[in-house]
Image: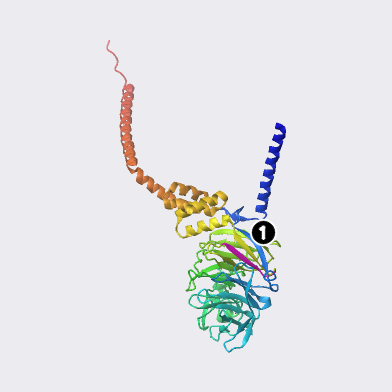
Amino acid sequence: MKKHLLRQITAAGITAVMAASALTTTAFADEPYDVYNYNYLGEAVPSQAGYLAERAVSGLDLGTTALKSPSDLYKDADDNFYIVDSGNNRILKVNSAFDEILLIMDTFIMPDGSTTTLKNPKGVYVSPDTGLIYIADNENSRALVVDANLKVQMEITKPTSTVYDQALTFLPQKILCDNAGNVYIVLNNTTKGAAMFDCDGEFIGYYGANAVAATAEVIANHFWNAIASEEEKKYRARSTPTAFDNFDIDVRKGFIYTSTSSGSTDTDIVKKVNPEGHNLFSYMSNFVWGDLFSTWYSGTSYKTKIVDIDIGDDGSINCLDSTTGRVFQYDEEASLLFIMGTIGEQVGAFSAGGVAAVETMGENCESVLVLDATKGTVTIFNQTVFGNIVHDATAKYNGGYYEEALEPWLEVLKRDGNYRRAYLGIASAYFNMGRYEDAMEYAKKADASGRYNRAFERWRSEFLKDNLTIILIALIVLIVAWQVIKRILKKRRAAALATATTELIPKAPEEE
C-alpha cells in the first residue's frame, strides 16, 4: 500500500515537472526568434521579451482586397490608423483594434467641385491640432491636404522658387506638419533635406539636411578642391550628404526625428532635429543604431538599414531595420530597451527587405505595429508584463523621479539579471538617496565608470565630513607618537654611540 502511494506521488511529481517544462517551452516558443539585448560589454545576451507578436492583419482580414505594396502606416490622435495602400492607390482608415475599416480614401473633392484620385501614394500624416490629413501623392507629383470629408483644402506642387532646382521632378515620399502648420516633404531626388512649406503652401526652403561624413576620401576631396583651379573643379568629384528618407515628429516637444537607410557611412542614421534645423544627436557620432555587431543575424555580415522611425507617445524612439526585420526600441535618451522581429514566415517575422513602416500606440507604448510591404500585412506586438515594468521604470527615471523608479528597476533585475539599464537606474536612485556605497556597487556592475566616480566622490566627501574629528585626532596622535618614537630612537642611538666610543679608546697601562 505504501509503495503504491509512493508511486502515485512520484508520478504526480513527474507530471507536474513535465507540465511546468511544457509551459516554459511554450512561453519561449511564442516568438520565432531569439530575444536578446546587449550587456555592458556590448555582447548580445538572452533577455526577457518586452513585446510578443499577437497577430498579423491583412486586407482580407479587414474585409477588403489584399494590400498591394503598402508603404506607410500612421496613427492619429484618436488611435485610428491610416494604411497607405500604394499599389491600390488608396488609403485605409482602420480602428485601433484593427478589425474594422472606418473609411476608404481613394477619391477626393477639389475646391472647384471636381474629383481627383491618388496615384501611387507613399506617405500620410494627420495633424493632431487640426485633424487635417496630409498625403504624399507620389506619381501625381503633389501633396494633398484634405479634411475629414475628403475635401481638398490645399494642393502643394513643384515650387517655382529659384532655390528649388527646376530640373528636378517633384516626387513626395513622406510628409508631416508641425504645430505651426508648416509642411515638410521628403523627396527622393535631393540631398538638401526635406522641402519645407508654410501653412499656405509657399516654399520656404530645405530643412534638416544630413552632414557629409568626414571620411578620408571626403577630406582628401576637400583639400584638392580647395587648391584646384576653376576648370579642374568642374571635373572633380563632389562630396554630397546622403539624403534621409523618412521622419517622424515628437508632437509633445516639436522635435523632428529623421532616419537614413542608404549611404556608405554611418553618419546621421538617426537625427533629432530642433526647429532651427540643428541635430541634437550630433554629439553621438560613435553611437550605433541597430545591432552593435553585424554578425548576429544568421552568422553572416550585414548592414543595418533603418527604413522608418516612430516616436511613441512616451518619447520612445522605434527604429525599423529592413535588413533583419527587427524593431529596435530606445527611450528618449537613446538607451536601448527592446529588440523584436526577424526574417521569416511566422507571426512576428517579416519578409526580407519587406518591412516599410513602424508605428506605436498607447501612452506607455503598449503596442508596436509593423507594416510588411511584401506580405501586405500589419503585425501587432503587444507589451508583456516585463515590458510594462521597464517602461514604467524608464518613464519615472527620465522624468527625474529616481527614487520612485527604484522598485520597478529592482523588479526588472529579478526577472532579467542581464538588463544593464536596470543597474544604471538603480545606481542613479541610490545616488539620489545618498546611498553612495550602494550606488557604487550597481554602477560597477553596469561598468559605468562615470557614475561610479561620482558616487565615490560623494561617498568620500560624506566619509570625511562624518569622521573629520576622529581623523584629526588620530592624525595628531600619530604625529605625537612619531615624535616620541623619534626622541626615544635618538636617545638610544646616542647611548649606543657613546658605548661604542668608550670601548674603542685604549686603556692606560697599570703602574707597577
Image position of 155 (left or right of 59): left
Q: Position of residue 415 (x, y in %)?
A: 57, 50
Region rendered in magenta: 366-374
Q: Residue 71's x, y, as percent?
A: 64, 73
Residue 274 vs 49, above or below: the answer is: below
Rendered position, 216 above or below 139: above
Residue at 33% x, 26% y is 496
Residue 244 belongs to magenta span: no
Residue 288 in view (yes/no): no
What residue is rendered at 69% in x and 43% in y? Answer: 15
> 449 and 358: which one is in front?
358
- Please, what secondary structure does the residue beneath circle 1 have? loop
- Is 373 colored magenta in this rendering? yes
Residue 510 screen position, x and y as percent: 28, 13
The type of colouring in the image is rainbow
Q: Examine the image and state in which quarter residue 310 appears.
A: bottom right
Q: Is residue 400 left or right of residue 380?
A: left
Residue pushed farthest bottom? 112
Indicate whether 108 appears above or below 481: below
Q: Which residue is mark 1?
A: 297
